[in-house]
Amino acid sequence: MSEMNELYYKDPYVRAFDATVLACDETKDGFAVVLDDTAFYPEGGGQPADTGRIGEAIVRDVRRKDGSVVHYTDRAVTVGEQVRCELDWGMRYDNMQNHTGEHVLTGVIRRAFGYDNVGFHMYPDRIGIDMSGELSDEDVRAMERAANDVIQADLPVEIGFPDEAQRAAMGFRQKKELTGLIRVVNIPGVDCCACCGTHVKTTREIGILKVLSSMRHRGGTRIEFVCGERALRDYAIKCEQIQQVSRQTSSKPNEVAAGVERLARQLALIEEAKGDWSRKYFALRAATLPSGQRLCILFEDSLTPFELKQFAMQLMPSGKAEVYAVLSAKTGEGDSAEYAYAIASPTVALRDPIRELNRVLNGRGGGRDIVQGTFAADEATVRRTLLATFG
Ligand SMILES: [Zn+2]
Protein backbone atom coordinates (compact mmCIF):
# COMPACT_ATOMS: atom_id res chain seq x y z
CA MET A 1 0.00 0.00 0.00
CA SER A 2 1.36 3.39 -0.91
CA GLU A 3 1.80 6.01 1.72
CA MET A 4 -1.06 8.38 2.54
CA ASN A 5 -3.64 6.05 1.05
CA GLU A 6 -4.60 4.14 4.17
CA LEU A 7 -8.08 4.06 5.63
CA TYR A 8 -7.21 6.55 8.40
CA TYR A 9 -6.38 9.06 5.65
CA LYS A 10 -9.33 8.28 3.41
CA ASP A 11 -11.70 8.57 6.36
CA PRO A 12 -10.31 9.62 9.75
CA TYR A 13 -13.74 8.95 11.30
CA VAL A 14 -13.54 5.17 10.87
CA ARG A 15 -13.52 3.67 14.34
CA ALA A 16 -14.13 0.00 13.43
CA PHE A 17 -13.35 -1.91 10.24
CA ASP A 18 -12.74 -5.39 8.79
CA ALA A 19 -9.30 -6.23 7.41
CA THR A 20 -7.34 -9.23 6.22
CA VAL A 21 -4.19 -10.19 8.09
CA LEU A 22 -1.21 -10.16 5.69
CA ALA A 23 1.54 -10.92 8.19
CA CYS A 24 2.00 -11.72 11.85
CA ASP A 25 5.55 -12.04 13.17
CA GLU A 26 6.66 -12.69 16.72
CA THR A 27 8.65 -9.88 18.35
CA LYS A 28 10.50 -9.52 21.68
CA ASP A 29 7.36 -8.89 23.69
CA GLY A 30 4.44 -9.59 21.35
CA PHE A 31 3.56 -9.68 17.67
CA ALA A 32 3.97 -7.41 14.65
CA VAL A 33 0.83 -7.48 12.50
CA VAL A 34 0.33 -6.09 8.99
CA LEU A 35 -3.19 -5.72 7.56
CA ASP A 36 -4.34 -5.20 3.96
CA ASP A 37 -5.61 -1.76 5.04
CA THR A 38 -5.87 0.01 8.37
CA ALA A 39 -7.55 2.82 10.26
CA PHE A 40 -4.90 2.69 13.01
CA TYR A 41 -2.76 5.81 12.84
CA PRO A 42 0.99 5.11 13.09
CA GLU A 43 2.91 7.52 15.28
CA GLY A 44 4.14 10.47 13.24
CA GLY A 45 4.16 14.23 12.80
CA GLY A 46 3.90 14.72 16.55
CA GLN A 47 0.68 12.68 16.79
CA PRO A 48 0.79 9.54 18.96
CA ALA A 49 -0.10 6.09 17.60
CA ASP A 50 -3.64 4.75 17.96
CA THR A 51 -4.43 1.85 20.27
CA GLY A 52 -7.33 -0.63 20.13
CA ARG A 53 -8.00 -4.21 19.07
CA ILE A 54 -7.40 -6.46 16.07
CA GLY A 55 -9.79 -9.35 16.76
CA GLU A 56 -8.91 -10.46 20.28
CA ALA A 57 -5.42 -8.97 20.13
CA ILE A 58 -4.73 -5.68 21.88
CA VAL A 59 -2.91 -3.09 19.75
CA ARG A 60 -0.32 -1.37 21.94
CA ASP A 61 1.58 0.64 19.34
CA VAL A 62 1.50 1.35 15.60
CA ARG A 63 4.48 2.37 13.47
CA ARG A 64 5.21 2.92 9.83
CA LYS A 65 8.02 0.60 8.78
CA ASP A 66 9.44 0.07 5.28
CA GLY A 67 6.33 1.48 3.64
CA SER A 68 3.78 -0.55 5.60
CA VAL A 69 1.90 0.11 8.82
CA VAL A 70 2.91 -2.33 11.56
CA HIS A 71 0.59 -2.97 14.52
CA TYR A 72 2.30 -4.20 17.68
CA THR A 73 -0.06 -6.55 19.53
CA ASP A 74 -0.07 -8.65 22.68
CA ARG A 75 -1.06 -11.87 20.89
CA ALA A 76 -1.01 -13.51 17.47
CA VAL A 77 -3.72 -13.28 14.80
CA THR A 78 -4.13 -15.76 11.94
CA VAL A 79 -2.58 -14.79 8.61
CA GLY A 80 -5.10 -14.83 5.76
CA GLU A 81 -8.10 -14.41 8.05
CA GLN A 82 -10.46 -11.47 8.03
CA VAL A 83 -10.63 -9.80 11.44
CA ARG A 84 -12.76 -7.13 13.06
CA CYS A 85 -10.63 -4.17 14.15
CA GLU A 86 -11.59 -1.46 16.59
CA LEU A 87 -9.85 1.77 17.61
CA ASP A 88 -9.81 3.34 21.07
CA TRP A 89 -11.97 6.04 19.57
CA GLY A 90 -12.04 8.36 22.57
CA MET A 91 -8.29 8.75 22.47
CA ARG A 92 -8.13 9.09 18.68
CA TYR A 93 -10.89 11.71 18.50
CA ASP A 94 -9.23 13.60 21.34
CA ASN A 95 -6.00 13.60 19.30
CA MET A 96 -7.91 14.83 16.22
CA GLN A 97 -9.48 17.71 18.17
CA ASN A 98 -6.21 18.74 19.80
CA HIS A 99 -4.13 18.32 16.66
CA THR A 100 -6.54 20.47 14.64
CA GLY A 101 -6.53 22.99 17.49
CA GLU A 102 -2.78 23.22 17.10
CA HIS A 103 -3.23 24.24 13.45
CA VAL A 104 -5.72 26.94 14.45
CA LEU A 105 -3.64 28.48 17.26
CA THR A 106 -0.44 28.37 15.18
CA GLY A 107 -2.31 29.92 12.24
CA VAL A 108 -3.78 32.86 14.15
CA ILE A 109 -0.43 33.64 15.81
CA ARG A 110 1.40 33.40 12.50
CA ARG A 111 -1.06 35.73 10.83
CA ALA A 112 -1.04 38.28 13.67
CA PHE A 113 2.70 38.28 14.50
CA GLY A 114 4.48 36.51 11.62
CA TYR A 115 6.01 33.94 13.97
CA ASP A 116 6.70 30.36 12.96
CA ASN A 117 5.84 27.19 14.82
CA VAL A 118 9.26 25.68 15.56
CA GLY A 119 8.25 22.92 17.98
CA PHE A 120 5.19 20.74 18.56
CA HIS A 121 4.61 18.24 21.38
CA MET A 122 1.50 16.17 22.04
CA TYR A 123 1.45 15.07 25.67
CA PRO A 124 -1.31 12.77 26.96
CA ASP A 125 -2.95 15.69 28.79
CA ARG A 126 -1.94 18.79 26.83
CA ILE A 127 -0.36 20.16 23.66
CA GLY A 128 2.77 22.30 23.56
CA ILE A 129 3.87 24.59 20.71
CA ASP A 130 6.98 26.72 20.44
CA MET A 131 6.49 29.96 18.51
CA SER A 132 9.56 31.74 17.17
CA GLY A 133 8.92 35.16 18.74
CA GLU A 134 7.98 36.67 22.07
CA LEU A 135 4.34 37.03 23.08
CA SER A 136 3.10 38.85 26.18
CA ASP A 137 0.40 37.32 28.39
CA GLU A 138 -2.01 39.82 26.84
CA ASP A 139 -0.98 38.73 23.30
CA VAL A 140 -1.56 35.09 24.22
CA ARG A 141 -5.02 35.90 25.63
CA ALA A 142 -5.88 37.71 22.40
CA MET A 143 -4.67 34.73 20.33
CA GLU A 144 -6.71 32.31 22.44
CA ARG A 145 -9.77 34.47 21.76
CA ALA A 146 -8.96 34.57 18.01
CA ALA A 147 -8.52 30.77 17.93
CA ASN A 148 -11.90 30.28 19.59
CA ASP A 149 -13.49 32.66 17.06
CA VAL A 150 -12.09 30.45 14.29
CA ILE A 151 -13.49 27.38 16.06
CA GLN A 152 -16.95 29.00 16.30
CA ALA A 153 -16.80 30.07 12.62
CA ASP A 154 -16.95 26.35 11.73
CA LEU A 155 -14.39 26.61 8.91
CA PRO A 156 -13.62 23.53 6.80
CA VAL A 157 -10.37 21.62 7.40
CA GLU A 158 -9.35 20.74 3.84
CA ILE A 159 -6.90 17.97 3.05
CA GLY A 160 -5.26 17.82 -0.39
CA PHE A 161 -2.12 17.31 -2.43
CA PRO A 162 -1.62 20.68 -4.19
CA ASP A 163 1.42 21.35 -6.35
CA GLU A 164 3.98 24.04 -5.57
CA ALA A 165 2.14 26.88 -7.34
CA GLN A 166 -1.14 25.99 -5.67
CA ARG A 167 0.59 25.80 -2.28
CA ALA A 168 2.11 29.25 -2.74
CA ALA A 169 -1.33 30.66 -3.54
CA MET A 170 -2.72 29.13 -0.32
CA GLY A 171 -0.12 30.81 1.96
CA PHE A 172 1.59 27.52 2.69
CA ARG A 173 3.86 27.37 5.77
CA GLN A 174 6.70 24.94 5.70
CA LYS A 175 9.23 23.86 8.33
CA LYS A 176 11.73 22.13 6.06
CA GLU A 177 12.36 21.58 2.35
CA LEU A 178 9.80 19.08 1.05
CA THR A 179 9.78 17.03 -2.12
CA GLY A 180 7.40 14.56 -3.76
CA LEU A 181 3.74 14.24 -2.88
CA ILE A 182 2.90 16.70 -0.12
CA ARG A 183 -0.21 16.31 2.00
CA VAL A 184 -1.45 19.78 2.85
CA VAL A 185 -3.91 20.71 5.58
CA ASN A 186 -5.66 23.97 4.81
CA ILE A 187 -8.00 25.93 7.05
CA PRO A 188 -8.90 28.78 4.66
CA GLY A 189 -7.59 32.13 5.85
CA VAL A 190 -6.11 30.60 9.01
CA ASP A 191 -3.45 27.98 8.39
CA CYS A 192 -1.99 25.98 5.55
CA CYS A 193 0.81 23.48 6.10
CA ALA A 194 2.12 20.02 5.36
CA CYS A 195 0.85 17.50 7.88
CA CYS A 196 0.50 13.73 8.05
CA GLY A 197 -1.83 13.67 11.08
CA THR A 198 -5.56 13.08 11.44
CA HIS A 199 -7.90 16.05 11.78
CA VAL A 200 -11.54 16.87 12.41
CA LYS A 201 -13.72 17.91 9.42
CA THR A 202 -14.52 21.44 10.53
CA THR A 203 -13.11 23.74 13.19
CA ARG A 204 -16.25 23.71 15.34
CA GLU A 205 -15.53 20.07 16.20
CA ILE A 206 -12.49 21.28 18.13
CA GLY A 207 -15.04 22.52 20.67
CA ILE A 208 -12.89 24.90 22.67
CA LEU A 209 -9.23 25.87 22.91
CA LYS A 210 -7.92 26.88 26.32
CA VAL A 211 -4.37 28.08 26.92
CA LEU A 212 -2.95 26.62 30.14
CA SER A 213 0.37 28.46 30.22
CA SER A 214 2.82 30.48 28.18
CA MET A 215 6.45 31.18 28.91
CA ARG A 216 9.57 32.51 27.26
CA HIS A 217 11.54 29.75 25.60
CA ARG A 218 14.74 30.12 23.54
CA GLY A 219 13.95 33.62 22.35
CA GLY A 220 10.37 32.66 21.54
CA THR A 221 7.27 31.54 23.40
CA ARG A 222 6.18 28.09 24.54
CA ILE A 223 2.42 27.79 24.81
CA GLU A 224 0.60 24.84 26.36
CA PHE A 225 -3.09 24.36 25.71
CA VAL A 226 -5.95 21.86 25.60
CA CYS A 227 -8.88 21.37 23.21
CA GLY A 228 -12.25 19.62 23.12
CA GLU A 229 -12.95 16.79 25.56
CA ARG A 230 -9.51 17.20 27.02
CA ALA A 231 -10.33 20.82 27.90
CA LEU A 232 -13.50 19.65 29.63
CA ARG A 233 -11.53 17.06 31.63
CA ASP A 234 -8.97 19.72 32.52
CA TYR A 235 -11.76 22.10 33.59
CA ALA A 236 -13.18 19.40 35.87
CA ILE A 237 -9.76 18.89 37.52
CA LYS A 238 -9.29 22.65 37.98
CA CYS A 239 -12.80 23.04 39.49
CA GLU A 240 -12.15 20.19 41.92
CA GLN A 241 -8.81 21.70 42.96
CA ILE A 242 -10.30 25.18 43.36
CA GLN A 243 -13.17 23.81 45.40
CA GLN A 244 -10.73 22.18 47.80
CA VAL A 245 -8.70 25.39 48.15
CA SER A 246 -11.94 27.33 48.51
CA ARG A 247 -13.09 25.14 51.42
CA GLN A 248 -9.69 25.21 53.12
CA THR A 249 -9.34 28.98 52.82
CA SER A 250 -13.03 29.77 53.47
CA SER A 251 -13.11 31.88 50.31
CA LYS A 252 -15.42 31.92 47.29
CA PRO A 253 -14.20 29.70 44.39
CA ASN A 254 -13.34 32.72 42.21
CA GLU A 255 -11.54 34.48 45.07
CA VAL A 256 -9.19 31.73 46.24
CA ALA A 257 -6.04 33.75 45.43
CA ALA A 258 -7.11 36.38 48.00
CA GLY A 259 -7.89 33.57 50.44
CA VAL A 260 -4.42 32.05 50.05
CA GLU A 261 -2.84 35.50 50.43
CA ARG A 262 -4.77 36.03 53.67
CA LEU A 263 -3.49 32.68 54.99
CA ALA A 264 0.08 33.57 54.02
CA ARG A 265 -0.22 36.87 55.94
CA GLN A 266 -1.57 35.03 59.00
CA LEU A 267 1.28 32.53 58.77
CA ALA A 268 3.84 35.35 58.66
CA LEU A 269 2.32 36.87 61.83
CA ILE A 270 2.39 33.49 63.59
CA GLU A 271 6.03 32.99 62.56
CA GLU A 272 6.88 36.40 63.95
CA ALA A 273 5.14 35.66 67.27
CA LYS A 274 6.83 32.27 67.44
CA GLY A 275 10.20 33.99 66.96
CA ASP A 276 9.43 36.36 69.87
CA TRP A 277 8.46 33.48 72.18
CA SER A 278 11.53 31.48 71.17
CA ARG A 279 13.84 34.37 72.03
CA LYS A 280 12.12 34.78 75.43
CA TYR A 281 12.41 31.03 76.07
CA PHE A 282 16.10 30.95 75.08
CA ALA A 283 16.82 33.91 77.41
CA LEU A 284 15.07 32.14 80.31
CA ARG A 285 16.96 28.89 79.65
CA ALA A 286 20.25 30.77 79.55
CA ALA A 287 19.47 32.55 82.84
CA THR A 288 18.72 29.28 84.67
CA LEU A 289 21.91 27.46 83.58
CA PRO A 290 24.55 26.81 86.28
CA SER A 291 27.70 28.93 85.92
CA GLY A 292 31.30 27.87 85.48
CA GLN A 293 30.79 24.90 83.10
CA ARG A 294 33.34 23.90 80.51
CA LEU A 295 30.69 22.46 78.21
CA CYS A 296 26.94 23.07 78.19
CA ILE A 297 24.89 20.47 76.25
CA LEU A 298 21.18 21.11 75.62
CA PHE A 299 18.88 18.71 73.78
CA GLU A 300 15.72 20.56 72.75
CA ASP A 301 12.52 19.40 71.06
CA SER A 302 11.76 20.32 67.46
CA LEU A 303 13.92 23.37 66.87
CA THR A 304 14.69 24.39 63.30
CA PRO A 305 18.35 24.98 62.27
CA PHE A 306 17.59 28.72 62.35
CA GLU A 307 16.27 28.46 65.92
CA LEU A 308 19.28 26.37 67.00
CA LYS A 309 21.53 29.14 65.74
CA GLN A 310 19.45 31.81 67.53
CA PHE A 311 19.66 29.80 70.74
CA ALA A 312 23.44 29.39 70.48
CA MET A 313 23.82 33.13 69.77
CA GLN A 314 21.81 33.99 72.88
CA LEU A 315 23.76 31.55 75.05
CA MET A 316 27.20 32.89 74.10
CA PRO A 317 27.08 36.23 75.98
CA SER A 318 25.66 34.55 79.15
CA GLY A 319 29.16 33.56 80.33
CA LYS A 320 27.85 30.31 81.84
CA ALA A 321 30.15 27.99 79.85
CA GLU A 322 33.04 27.98 77.39
CA VAL A 323 31.37 25.81 74.76
CA TYR A 324 27.64 25.58 74.05
CA ALA A 325 26.11 22.71 72.11
CA VAL A 326 22.38 22.81 71.36
CA LEU A 327 20.80 19.90 69.53
CA SER A 328 17.40 18.88 68.22
CA ALA A 329 16.32 15.48 66.83
CA LYS A 330 15.73 15.57 63.07
CA THR A 331 14.46 12.10 62.31
CA GLY A 332 14.03 8.68 63.84
CA GLU A 333 14.52 7.56 67.39
CA GLY A 334 17.18 5.72 69.40
CA ASP A 335 20.04 4.31 67.37
CA SER A 336 18.80 5.64 64.04
CA ALA A 337 18.49 9.19 65.32
CA GLU A 338 19.82 12.19 63.48
CA TYR A 339 20.43 15.44 65.34
CA ALA A 340 20.78 18.94 63.98
CA TYR A 341 23.31 20.89 65.99
CA ALA A 342 24.62 24.39 66.63
CA ILE A 343 27.87 24.63 68.56
CA ALA A 344 29.29 27.97 69.64
CA SER A 345 32.12 29.24 71.80
CA PRO A 346 33.41 32.72 72.60
CA THR A 347 36.86 31.31 73.59
CA VAL A 348 37.57 27.87 72.04
CA ALA A 349 38.66 27.37 68.42
CA LEU A 350 36.07 24.97 66.98
CA ARG A 351 37.43 24.02 63.59
CA ASP A 352 39.51 20.95 64.52
CA PRO A 353 37.22 19.54 67.24
CA ILE A 354 34.20 19.82 64.91
CA ARG A 355 36.01 17.99 62.14
CA GLU A 356 36.75 15.18 64.61
CA LEU A 357 33.13 15.16 65.90
CA ASN A 358 31.75 14.94 62.37
CA ARG A 359 34.07 12.02 61.68
CA VAL A 360 33.13 10.06 64.82
CA LEU A 361 29.40 10.86 64.71
CA ASN A 362 28.88 10.49 60.93
CA GLY A 363 28.15 14.17 60.84
CA ARG A 364 28.58 17.05 58.49
CA GLY A 365 28.53 20.78 58.76
CA GLY A 366 30.74 23.73 59.51
CA GLY A 367 30.85 27.44 60.06
CA ARG A 368 32.99 30.09 61.72
CA ASP A 369 31.71 31.51 65.00
CA ILE A 370 28.70 29.24 65.23
CA VAL A 371 29.10 25.79 63.72
CA GLN A 372 25.98 24.11 62.37
CA GLY A 373 25.31 20.68 60.95
CA THR A 374 23.97 17.23 61.73
CA PHE A 375 25.17 14.16 63.62
CA ALA A 376 23.87 10.70 62.71
CA ALA A 377 24.04 9.02 66.13
CA ASP A 378 21.86 8.44 69.20
CA GLU A 379 21.64 10.92 72.06
CA ALA A 380 23.88 9.01 74.50
CA THR A 381 26.66 8.66 71.93
CA VAL A 382 26.43 12.33 70.93
CA ARG A 383 26.56 13.39 74.60
CA ARG A 384 29.50 11.08 75.40
CA THR A 385 31.50 12.19 72.36
CA LEU A 386 30.89 15.89 73.04
CA LEU A 387 32.08 15.45 76.64
CA ALA A 388 35.19 13.56 75.49
CA THR A 389 35.97 16.28 72.95
CA PHE A 390 35.36 19.43 75.02
CA GLY A 391 35.08 18.21 78.64
ZN1 LIG B 1 -2.05 18.36 11.34
Image (cartoon, grey):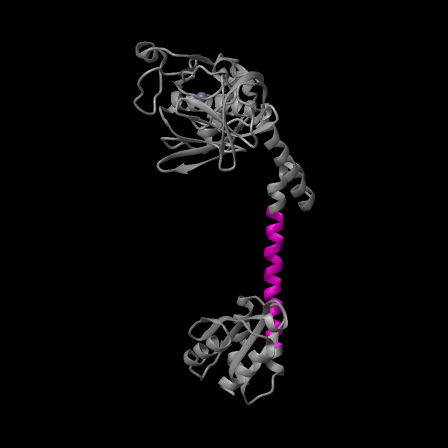
Left or right: where 377 falls relative to 160: right
Q: What x and y, as percent, mark residue 352?
A: 41, 80
Q: Is residue 361 above or below residue 17?
A: below
Q: Quadrant of residue 215?
A: top left
Q: In this view, does 338 lie above or below 65?
A: below
On the question of residue 188 being in view, the answer is no
On the question of residue 166 being in view, the answer is yes
Name the residue rendered at 53%, 22% in the picture: 79
Q: In this view, does 127 lie above or below 201?
A: below
Q: What x and y, as percent, mark residue 118?
A: 37, 30
Left or right: where 47 falls relative to 328: left
User: Mostly what secondary structure, the magenta segment?
Assistant: helix
Q: Which quadrant is the N terminus positioned in?
A: top left
Q: Nearer the viewer, residue 13 or 80?
A: 80
Q: Does the magenta-highlighted stretch encompass residue 272? A: yes
Q: What x and y, as percent, mark residue 169?
A: 33, 10
Ligand 1 shown in quarter: top left
Range of residues picked out in magenta: 261-284
Name the residue rendered at 59%, 56% in the picture: 268
Q: How many marks?
A: 0
Q: Quadrant of residue 369?
A: bottom left
Q: What x and y, as percent, mark residue 163?
A: 33, 11
Q: Which of 266 and 328 is in front in this view?
A: 328
